[in-house]
Amino acid sequence: MSQATVVTMGTFDGLHRGHQAVLAEVKRRARAGKLASVLVTFDPHPLAVVNPAAAPKLLSLPEEKEAAVRADGIDRFVLMAFTPAVAQLDAEAFVRRLCDEYEMRELVMGYDHGFGRGRAGDVELVERLAGEQGFGMAVVDAVRDNGQPISSTLIRTAIAHGDLDSAARWLGRRYSIRGTVVRGAGRGRTIGIPTINLAPPDSRKLLPPDGVYAVRVKLQGRGKGEGAMLGGMMNQGPRPTFGEQARTLEAHLFDFDGELYGETVDVEWVRRLREVQAFPSRDALVAQLERDRQAARATLNR
């Protein structure tokens, strides 16, 4: 027989400090009741189905979200396909589904969470359902910064405007992207600055403004250097010096000379150093990259 559970559900985009408070309560209740902890989330973002024009860019793609949830110590990560049929479920049907599919004994909600058709499943309704269906419930209050509730919307605005420090404060960590290393043109090696190229990111992922950034890169591979965190600098955007307009993510890693093709890496944006710009010559580019390298090292050593 499967283990009864404490459940929370929602979009949890970004797994920010407010979300982390919800997960802490889920884990606390699961331990106290000898239950399993479960997070149910959705793909795509519900607004992409209900009101596509209003669907936001995402702070965390599904695989990034799963990695963060598992690292937080939640027992089960459930990615539910958000379909038009799911969008039509009323709150009562949704709660019944949680009780039936996950043997839910307790439901933990954020203070502002609404679910079910028309987001009618608010705290008041769930309290009534809990009484009728015999499960416990808990509501977790907002986590605030200078009186302002931390939210995914707040963080998206900060990142879109390049305010990485505020985003990191509200996330509880640096904003990052997970990507696969692919082969590039190999130009970096010819000018003494070898780089790794990431596969083009999912178009749903929110990126900060294009530019050259100081970054930290975590290696996820199982081989040599697994889990290592390396400093570096990254060009995000076009490469106008070479007449390439497509946006790329290309990073030079400090003090590293291994092969990473096919490996998964997490890149954290630390600070924007400058805008993308075209250079009149190879020598001018190399000179600027050396200045970028010094600026990035100084930033990362702070």
Image (cartoon, rainbow, N blue to C red):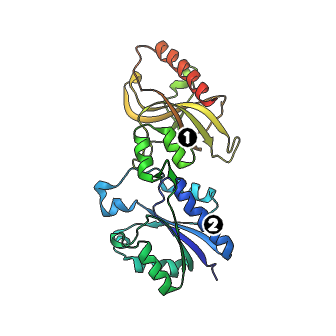
- Residue 120 appears anywhere in the view: yes
> Disc 2 vs disc 1: Cβ atoms closer than 8 Å?
no
Residue at 50% of width from left, 53% of height from top? 144
Residue at 55% of width from left, 63% of height from top? 22
| Furthest residue toward right | 224
Q: Secondary structure at mark 2?
A: helix
Q: Position of residue 239 (x, y in %)?
A: 41, 27
Q: Compared with residue 235, is residue 283 higher up or lower down, i.e. above or below?
A: above
Q: Position of residue 223 (x, y in %)?
A: 69, 45
Q: Compared with residue 7, is residue 192 higher up or lower down, i.e. above or below?
A: above
The quarter in which the C terminus is drawn is top right
Q: Secondary structure at mark 1?
A: strand
Q: Nearer the viewer, residue 175 or 188?
A: 175
Q: Position of residue 246 (x, y in %)?
A: 38, 34
Disc marking residue 238: none
Q: Badge 2 local density, few (<14 within 10 Å), some, or many (20+)? A: many
Of badges 2 and 1, the one in the foreground is: 2
